[in-house]
């Protein structure tokens, strides 16, 4: 598995760039304050906290949206509460405490047929994995199908970036689903909640595929239960939920 080339001796990072990805969603790009090491697997998360009293000294976990080949650490964050709002209001040059990455929500290279089920901001770890695998040529021998559910087209995160990876790659396919609007965009053909019926229609066969589910807790739990009812064994399903 790959690791980043950034060397790190502490966990203080400075904000270098803010990018609007979608409605209410920003990507924050950080660089280490000093010479540092930061190794991570695409799909992992980092714990974030402020250096002052903002957000009452709380700590929150956010999936990393950059890849090990980047020379920065990116977190893509949806504005949902006081903590994420404070992050959205950060100014360029401000410093944050960011922990060593953790978590095991990522596929092994030996998994040849992978299915990602993303709800809203749950696309974040999948984007890091997909981009990394594309960079390293793994999509030439591993198949990934991404089902990505959003409320509206404006809320789709990394829409252009995902399409740029999918267009030349026969082994990477994206199925977009919208739940609260219809659009004439030819890339978006599904206007309903994501369920096993839709998944089975696209995949034909569930057996032998590895499923990764990420999104709101209800989204994750419902799909996990449906997959189990349809014969997918528990060791073929991995989940990560946002509360």
Image (cartoon, rainbow, N blue to C red):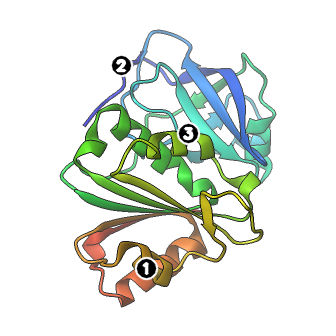
Q: Secondary structure at mark 1?
A: helix
Residue 64, visible in the rendered structure: no
Q: Earlier in the sequence, mark 3 or mark 1?
A: 3
Considering every residue shown, the one lying at the far top of the view is 35
Considering every residue shown, the one lying at the far left of the view is 110
Q: Secondary structure at mark 2?
A: loop
Q: Position of residue 2 (x, y in %)?
A: 28, 32
* 67 up-or-down from 14: above or below: below
Q: Secondary structure at mark 3?
A: helix
**Neighbours of disc 1 within 10 Å: few (<14), some (14-19), many (20+):** few
Q: Which of the two residues, 28 or 97, is positioned nearer the viewer here?
A: 28
Q: Position of residue 120 (x, y in %)?
A: 63, 59
Distance from Cα at disc 2 to Cα at disc 1: 41 Å
Q: Is residue 194 left or right of residue 38?
A: right
Q: Position of residue 57 (x, y in %)?
A: 70, 41
Question: What residue does disc 2 label?
Answer: 5
Residue 21 falls in image quadrant: top right
Q: Nearer the viewer, mark 2 or mark 1?
A: 1
Q: Nearer the viewer, mark 3 or mark 2?
A: 3
- Residue 201 shows which numbered tag? 1
Distance from Cα at disc 3 to Cα at disc 2: 23 Å
Residue 15 falls in image quadrant: top right
Residue at image position (79%, 49%) is: 82
Q: Position of residue 146 (x, y in %)?
A: 46, 59
* 17 up-or-down from 120: above or below: above
Question: What residue does disc 3 label?
Answer: 161
**Neighbours of disc 2 within 10 Å: few (<14), some (14-19), many (20+):** some
* 202 up-or-down from 88: above or below: below
Residue at image position (47%, 20%) is: 10
């Amino acid at each position: 598995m790959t690791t980043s080339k950034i060397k790190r001796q502490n966990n203080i990072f400075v904000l270098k760039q803010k990018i609007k990805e979608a409605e209410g969603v920003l990507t924050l790009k950080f660089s280490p304050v000093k010479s540092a090491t930061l190794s991570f697997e695409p799909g992992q998360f980092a714990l974030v906290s402020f250096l002052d009293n903002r957000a009452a000294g709380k700590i929150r976990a956010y999936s990393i949206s950059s890849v090990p080949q980047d020379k920065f650490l990116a977190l893509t964050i949806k504005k949902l509460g006081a903590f994420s709002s404070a992050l959205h209001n950060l100014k360029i040059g401000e410093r944050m405490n960011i922990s060593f990455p953790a978590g095991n929500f990522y596929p092994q290279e030996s998994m040849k047929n992978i299915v990602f089920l993303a709800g809203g901001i749950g696309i974040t770890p999948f984007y890091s994995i997909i981009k990394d695998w594309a960079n390293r040529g793994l999509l030439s021998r591993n198949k990934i199908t991404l089902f990505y559910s959003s409320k509206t087209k404006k809320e789709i995160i990394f829409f252009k970036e995902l399409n740029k990876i999918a267009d030349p790659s026969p082994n990477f396919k994206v199925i977009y689903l919208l739940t609260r609007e219809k659009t004439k965009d030819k890339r978006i053909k599904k206007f309903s909640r994501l369920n096993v019926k839709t998944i089975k229609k696209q995949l034909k066969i569930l057996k032998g595929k590895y499923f990764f589910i990420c999104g709101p807790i209800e989204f994750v739990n419902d799909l996990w239960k449906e997959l189990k009812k349809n014969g997918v064994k528990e060791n073929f399903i991995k989940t990560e939920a946002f509360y």
